[in-house]
Image (spheres, rainbow, N blue to C red):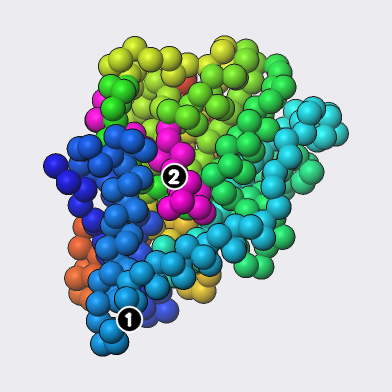
Amino acid sequence: MVTTPITCSDSYDHQDTQESCIRSHIIACGGDADHKDKGGERGLRKKVKRFFHSKASSNSSGVNSSAVAMASFETSCRRKLRSGPSVVIPAAPAAACGGSNKRALLCGVTYSHQHRYMLKGTANDVSNMKNLLTNTFGYPAECIRILSDDPGAQDLIPTKKNIENSLKWLVEGCKWGDSLVFYFSGHGLRQPDFQNDELDGYDETICPVDFLKEGMILDNDINKTIVWPLKEGVKLHAIVDACHSGTILDLEHVYNRKQRTWINNLPPSGARKSTSGGLAISISACEDDKMAADTTVFTKKEMNGAMTYILTKTVKENPQITYGGLLDTMANHIVNINSERWIKSRIIRKVLRHKTLQEPMLSSSAKFEVNDTKFIL
């Protein structure tokens, strides 16, 4: 089976509301020799080159504009990435945070070096999440590391290496009583699972700014990096606003909101996915086979990730809310938005078709009483 590109229109404007292209433009959904060396990266690169070729083929000149376009894209990407500072992981992260037991890593990737993949809402997502952490949950600003490639930002660039190093920084030296947060807003993809540790046969991934060159970050690697090291008494929350992010941490239990029950997500291979006694909780924008979206439907002005905006607004307005209450409130918001859009506009119905906003998904390393446990980061 070969990989199949799945695309959607870049954006639409209707009655002061703009919705960006669904966050995943290309999905590696097949598995043959092309994907085995680097988990589908080669297949993805082929699709990107094919995109440039199709764009260039409309050019009437005799110049090999496809090669020129690809070379120009990769050059601009390298130039952008070289300008970003490298991450130096502190030897003692807790000390660097002034002894605080709260630490957070926020990643917002705009992919601003290439318009085709660019996301306009991720910078706002990071800002909203930082405000939630500092103003509602008391995270010291010096204990929050931000990775961003937004042109106006002064933060570290979210390259694959920087994200991986920062994930290590997040959990390094964690101890009883620590609260850790990993937040990501950007593109997410999925690719065939060759280790038999996924129930649906696919690994989920997040895309750093240099994913075309360096590859994606797999759920397996995220699990090993920030889930395995969690000691007893340590709590980690991952909030991932990206396509195909449902089980991005590969946690052992997935919550079914409609049935009000936990579902087993243990890997068929028996591979380790557990913590070292701590607790890992993940809230994702959608299920593994679904897509997430940026939208201006909330503010009519700024682009935001739908899940991030609803989550931060809900928690600010209801600081005593439980996990179950949060999931229900978010789901109700999304149902209302989808209903309004489909009822009011035939144009939107035609453009979106099945690309409605998706319900968020909760997973955890251990079962807990969702409707009785207060949501605290």
Q: Which mark is residue 216?
A: none
> Which residue is drawn at the image coordinates 77% and 46% (left, top)?
141
Question: Which of the pair 124/221 is nearer the observer?
Answer: 221
Residue 34 x %, y %: 25, 42
Residue 126 x %, y %: 60, 53
User: Which secondary structure lies at badge 1?
Assistant: loop
Residue 370 x %, y %: 45, 26
Magenta residues span 199-219
> Which residue is drawn at the image coordinates 26% and 87% (left, top)?
60
The residue most toward the bottom is 60
Crowdedness near tag 1: few (<14), some (14–19) or many (≥20) residues, C-alpha within 10 Å: few
The residue pinned by badge 1 equals 63
Camera-near label (2 vs 1) is: 1
N-terminal of the pair, mark 2 or mark 1, is 1
> Which residue is drawn at the image coordinates 67% and 60% (left, top)?
83
Question: Which of the pair 193/274 is nearer the observer?
Answer: 193
Quadrant position of the C terminus in the picture: top right
The answer to whether residue 208 is magenta is: yes
The residue pinned by badge 2 equals 215
